Image: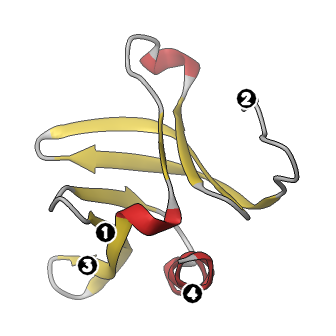
Amino acid sequence: MRIDLKANEVVIKATDTLHSHGSDSTRGKLILTNQRLYFKPSAKEGEKRGFELMPHEIRDILLYNILTVIPAGIELVTGNGLKLRFRLKNRNEWSRQIALLC
């Protein structure tokens, strides 16, 4: 899985994830660079489109749990109120790295 990097852009972290928005879920890869956060759907999710978030678009970084006690991942809230959830491991490290970018 490849993304086209911009000039002077470097990948900081990447992981497999399950992205959910409302009732829609998509498997793919979450990629954090020094300039943006990018989600690329897996090949099996062919008709789904990837997206990118620029640091200034992220308003809040929240941690969420399943059944109130099982750590699950992070939820990003954009400036226009869009809520994007990503199930991933090492959520504390991911949230810290994203916060440093913002």
Tell me if residue 42 comes above or below residue 81 in the rendering: above
| Sequence-first disc among 4 and 3 | 3
- The quadrant holding residue 66 is bottom left
- Image quarter of residue 27: top left
| Comes first in the chain, label 2 or label 1 | 2
Q: How is the image coloured?
A: secondary structure
Q: Distance from label 2 to label 1 (Cα)?
A: 23 Å
* Image position, residue 69 (x, y; %): 23, 88
Asked which secondary structure carries label 1, the reply is strand
User: Image height check: is 99 above or below 89?
Assistant: below
Residue type at the position of mark 1: Glu
> In this rendering, which labeled residue sits more in front, label 4 or label 3?
4
The residue indicated by pointer 3 is 65
Residue 85 is marked as: none
Q: Are marks 2 and 1 in contact (CB under 8 Å)?
A: no
Camera-near label (4 vs 2) is 4
Spot occupied by residue 32 in the image (x, y as percentages of width and height): 65, 59
Label 4 belongs to which residue? 96
The residue drawn where x is 53% and y is 83% is 99
Cα distance in 3D space between marks 1 and 4: 13 Å
